[in-house]
């Protein structure tokens, strides 16, 4: 791969999206996920959850300086104004804190679990992890740990890597038949000799907490209740909980995968956005992205969307998590960023999204990497598990 990059995001490739996040776990531990956004040198101030017209976060410090947002422009309440190439930027880019939103969702899920427990119902999640893949093991353990914290029953099944497709189908059939299991998740990737598509379609649509089954895709398109893919659902939660407009917005999605691009387009369309889906074969891609009020990048290429491709003041949703292992590329993406340099020196790599970090200075709001969309994946999985438990028992799910 050119420049020493290792691409983990697979929206234009074959592997589902959550595969990209497994290698980001250690990066969160290194940068301090529990400390808001210290890992990307962001100081977050003044969250105004009930006011869409106030900056919920103020960007300060080294990260801002490294990306062209200077402290005297954004800190201490001073008036910020910087001349862009064509337009004057007069608003502070808002950092959309996925970690905080994920914590909020988990708290709500925990409350729902308690309500179900009062009725004698304990939601159950089964996770199938085939073989010995250390990164997947870390990610699955995180899911199981979160289940325990929220009061959701969980099982982790770990068949040997030599298991056949037919044996896996039998395992899934057994889980489909169990009343105490509401959600089934098959951790990807599977060994090459296993028919992944056949297995994913074997999961009961009512227990498909990943939202990958064609039946659930059809339910999403037709507006029927069902289970939706976790990452696109997380995108909608970020926008709504941050009180950012969706209705009537010109939304452009870069990436057409079945796991992110297509379902995200449908969800945004259901929220009355005007949606355009672009991809690697789109002619004159910047023409489309520069018109986007809301830009979702999910193409699996580090820094693919550059600052020149962004409409000033747009909301930028960066789905990609790509590992960069070349020092020159790290400097290109994060010039003068001492924290990223220290991370690279310690680990030999850093993560970057599908949007070039320099583009964030032009935005009205953006999701950081890490700490943005990826932080919501497990939270939405927990949400889906409880939703499945309710739907299977005919219990109202409200607006979820």
Image (cartoon, helix red, strand yellow):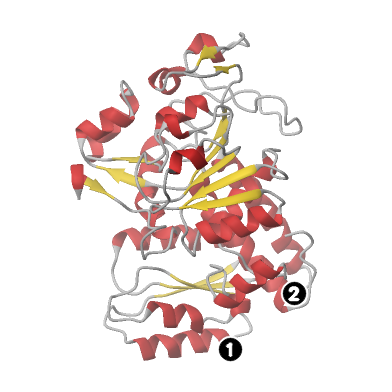
Residue 144's disc number: none
Question: Residue at point 37% right, 64% down?
Answer: 15
Q: Position of residue 180 (x, y in %)?
A: 62, 80
Tell me the distance, in whole angstroms, between the alpha carbons under discs 2 and 1: 20 Å
On screen, residue 385 above or below 6? below
Front position among marks 2 and 1: 1
Residue 374 lies left or right of residue 163; in this view the side is right
Identify the image quadrant of residue 380: bottom right
Query: Is label 2 in a helix, a strand or a loop?
Result: loop
Q: Is residue 344 left or right of residue 392?
A: left
- The residue under the point 72% across, 74% down is 391
| Element on which disc 1 rests | helix
Furthest residue to the front?
Answer: 283
Mark 1, other Cα within 10 Å: few <14 / some 14–19 / many ≥20: few
Instruction: Describe residue 51's horizontal placement relative to residue 94 as left or right.
Output: right
User: Above or below — where is 378 with respect to 87?
Assistant: below
Residue 340's x, y, as percent?
Answer: 32, 30
Quarter occupied by the C terminus: bottom right
- Report whether residue 219 is seen: yes
The residue at 39%/68% (across/down) is: 188
Q: Which of the two labelled residues, at mark 2 and mark 1, occupies the earlier sequence position? A: 2
Query: Residue under circle 1?
Result: 177
- Number of numbered discs on residues: 2
Q: Which residue in the structure is indicated by mark 2?
A: 120
């Amino acid at each position: 791969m050119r420049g020493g990059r290792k691409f983990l995001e697979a929206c234009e490739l074959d592997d589902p999206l959550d595969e990209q996040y497994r290698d980001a776990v250690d990066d969160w531990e290194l940068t301090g996920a529990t400390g808001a956004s210290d890992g990307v040198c962001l100081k977050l101030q003044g969250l105004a959850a009930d006011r869409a017209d106030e900056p919920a976060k103020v960007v300060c410090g080294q990260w801002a300086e490294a990306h062209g947002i200077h402290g005297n422009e954004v800190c201490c309440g001073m008036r910020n104004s910087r001349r862009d190439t064509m337009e004057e930027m007069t608003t502070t880019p808002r950092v959309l804190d996925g970690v905080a939103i994920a914590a909020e969702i988990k708290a709500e899920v925990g409350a729902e679990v308690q309500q179900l427990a009062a009725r004698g119902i304990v939601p159950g999640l089964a996770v199938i992890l085939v073989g010995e893949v250390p990164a997947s093991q870390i990610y699955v353990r995180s899911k199981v740990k979160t289940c325990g914290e929220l009061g959701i029953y969980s099982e982790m099944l770990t068949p040997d890597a030599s298991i056949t497709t037919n044996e896996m189908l039998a395992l899934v059939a057994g889980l489909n038949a169990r009343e105490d299991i509401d959600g089934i998740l098959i951790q990807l990737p599977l060994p090459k000799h296993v028919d992944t598509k056949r297995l994913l379609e074997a999961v009961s649509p009512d227990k498909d907490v990943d939202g990958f089954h064609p039946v659930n895709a059809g339910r999403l398109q037709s507006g029927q209740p069902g289970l939706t893919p976790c990452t696109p659902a997380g995108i909608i939660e970020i926008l709504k909980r941050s009180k950012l407009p969706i209705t009537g917005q010109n939304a452009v999605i870069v990436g057409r995968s079945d796991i992110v691009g297509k379902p995200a387009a449908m969800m945004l369309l259901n929220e009355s956005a005007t949606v355009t889906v672009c991809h690697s074969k789109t002619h004159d891609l910047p023409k489309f992205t520069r018109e986007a009020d809301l830009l979702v990048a999910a193409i699996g290429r580090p820094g693919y969307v550059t600052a020149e491709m962004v409409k000033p003041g747009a909301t930028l949703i960066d789905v990609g998590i790509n590992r960069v292992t070349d020092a020159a590329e790290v400097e290109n993406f994060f010039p003068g960023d001492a924290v990223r340099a220290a991370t690279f020196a310690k680990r030999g790599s850093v993560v970057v999204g599908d949007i070039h970090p320099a583009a964030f200075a032009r935005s009205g709001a953006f999701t950081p990497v890490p700490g943005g969309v990826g932080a919501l994946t497990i939270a939405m999985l927990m949400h889906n598990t409880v939703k499945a438990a309710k739907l299977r028992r005919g219990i109202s799910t409200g607006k979820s």
